[in-house]
């Protein structure tokens, strides 16, 4: 028995070093992974397919007499739309901009469907197709986020001197690959240490991994993605390398901030007027709370809020149930109406809609003295809401500020339109349903 077993092992090792064989096997495994991922989101996609048919039918029933011959062609085309888009998104599951990609792919697919049906002179309701595109886009964004956050991968860590410490931080039972001749067939992703594994010893192993379709990711990056925050101990300022898309977005973001203020201003003025009068009646003057906060590039600025706490209260951040909050003004804080004057700060350029929350100047100085890396969060404009805010909530002490620092640095490293939209969505969810960090 030992003879055949040894022969099979030698055959596997020989094939493992045959790059042509590995490449062919990689294509097969890649197809298998796509099918597996597609199966995981199939119920949501099929539900979307049924929904768009129902929406289109509801739209055309309200118009002119239905042409059922045309409906028999348009309906299956619309039902196939989310299925095709989902298959495309599965192959793009590791893209850094999942929301943008899902929206773009869905938009292109809708345009293609309209163009094909028009070319074939098939009668259709354009408004019905557009009504179908909206929920399909939303569902495809959810699909992309689910694929991005999937934890069903078979992951292994390549051995290096700090592997034990890395495994402790990863907090999972992840096997360690200790030699370059290991079988690739049982893993979907390898976690590496850049300083160790980009070397001659591991180069052939990594080449085989790439050719077979196994994903290769630095373990620190994998940890950050799973936790949504950086590891402060291993973080270095040189880790912040802005991609071209981030540089472009950082330039466009200021225009988006101003446009957002212009759009929100009519509603904000009405709410601010009622809030002003309510606070004046309940608490008297002063109505506004003015404070120095640490801003972009380390420069202090004056922040404006509606006052909801008693005069001369301690200066650390307050929680919704804080006993310093004036009676009857707790609702103002819960609805975040006290933040409305900060639209002026956004207009001035002191703040953005999304970014690390600006800390009180004294708290920032104490945090920087305790952890010099704290200053790195000031590389972007502070925001009305932020990644740390929706994941960790308020910070009232220096220790809590440093605990939130990992989330703020994660935002600085990964700033993008997608992340900002996700933060805004989480903020709305917190305000409406009180779900998540406060």
Image: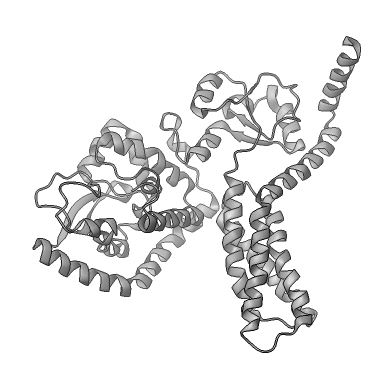
Establish if 107 lies above or below 96: below
- Rendered residue at 45%/59% (across/down): 251
- Rendered residue at 50%/47% (across/down): 242
Name of the residue lying farthest toward the bottom: 64
Q: Could you tell whether 348 is left or right of 191 in the image?
A: left
Please say whether residue 129 is visible from this viewpoint: no
- Give the image location of residue 162, x and y in percent: 53, 20
- Give the image location of residue 114, x and y in percent: 71, 75
- Rendered residue at 12%/66% (across/down): 280
Establish if 109 lies above or below 5: below
- Give the image location of residue 104, x and y in percent: 62, 62
The image quadrant of residue 193 is top right
Q: Quadrant of the N terminus?
A: top right
Front in this rendered view, residue 172 or 224: 172
- Rendered residue at 60%/24% (across/down): 196
Please say whether residue 121 is visible from this viewpoint: yes
């Amino acid at each position: 028995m030992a003879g055949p077993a040894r022969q099979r092992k030698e055959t596997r090792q020989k094939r493992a070093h045959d790059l042509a064989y590995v490449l062919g096997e990689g294509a097969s495994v890649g197809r298998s992974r796509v099918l597996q991922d597609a199966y995981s989101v199939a119920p949501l996609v099929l539900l979307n397919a049924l929904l768009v048919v129902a929406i289109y039918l509801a739209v055309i029933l309200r118009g002119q007499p239905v042409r059922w011959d045309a409906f028999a062609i348009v309906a299956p085309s619309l039902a196939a739309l989310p299925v095709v888009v989902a298959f495309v998104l599965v192959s793009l599951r590791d893209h850094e901009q999942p929301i943008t990609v899902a929206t773009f792919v869905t938009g292109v697919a809708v345009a293609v469907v309209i163009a094909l049906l028009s070319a074939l002179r098939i009668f259709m309701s354009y408004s019905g197709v557009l009504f179908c595109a909206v929920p399909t886009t939303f569902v495809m964004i959810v699909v992309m986020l689910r694929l991005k956050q999937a934890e069903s991968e078979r992951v292994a860590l390549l051995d290096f001197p700090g592997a034990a410490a890395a495994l402790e931080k990863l907090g999972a039972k992840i096997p360690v690959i200790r030699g370059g001749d290991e079988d690739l067939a049982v893993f979907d992703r390898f976690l590496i240490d850049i300083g160790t594994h980009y070397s001659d010893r591991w180069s052939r192993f990594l080449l085989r991994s790439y050719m077979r379709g196994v994903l290769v990711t630095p373990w620190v990056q994998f940890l950050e993605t799973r936790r949504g925050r950086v590891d402060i101990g291993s973080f270095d300022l040189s880790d912040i390398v802005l991609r071209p898309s981030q540089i472009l977005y950082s330039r466009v973001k200021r225009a988006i901030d101003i446009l957002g203020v212009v759009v929100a201003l009519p509603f904000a003025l009405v709410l601010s007027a009622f809030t002003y009068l309510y606070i004046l009646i309940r608490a008297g003057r002063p109505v506004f709370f003015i404070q120095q906060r640490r801003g972009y590039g380390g420069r202090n600025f004056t922040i404006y809020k509606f006052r909801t706490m008693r005069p001369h209260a301690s200066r650390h951040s307050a929680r919704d149930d804080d006993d310093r909050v004036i009676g009857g003004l707790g609702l103002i804080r819960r609805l975040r109406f006290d933040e409305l004057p900060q639209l002026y700060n956004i207009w001035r350029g002191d703040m953005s809609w999304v970014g690390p929350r600006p800390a009180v100047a004294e708290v920032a100085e104490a945090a920087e003295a305790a952890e010099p890396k704290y200053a790195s969060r000031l590389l972007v404009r502070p925001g009305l809401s932020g990644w740390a805010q929706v994941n960790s909530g308020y910070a009232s002490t220096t220790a809590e500020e440093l605990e939130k620092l990992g989330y703020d640095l994660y935002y600085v490293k990964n700033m993008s339109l997608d992340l900002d939209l996700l933060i805004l969505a989480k903020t709305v969810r917190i305000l409406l349903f009180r779900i998540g960090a406060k």
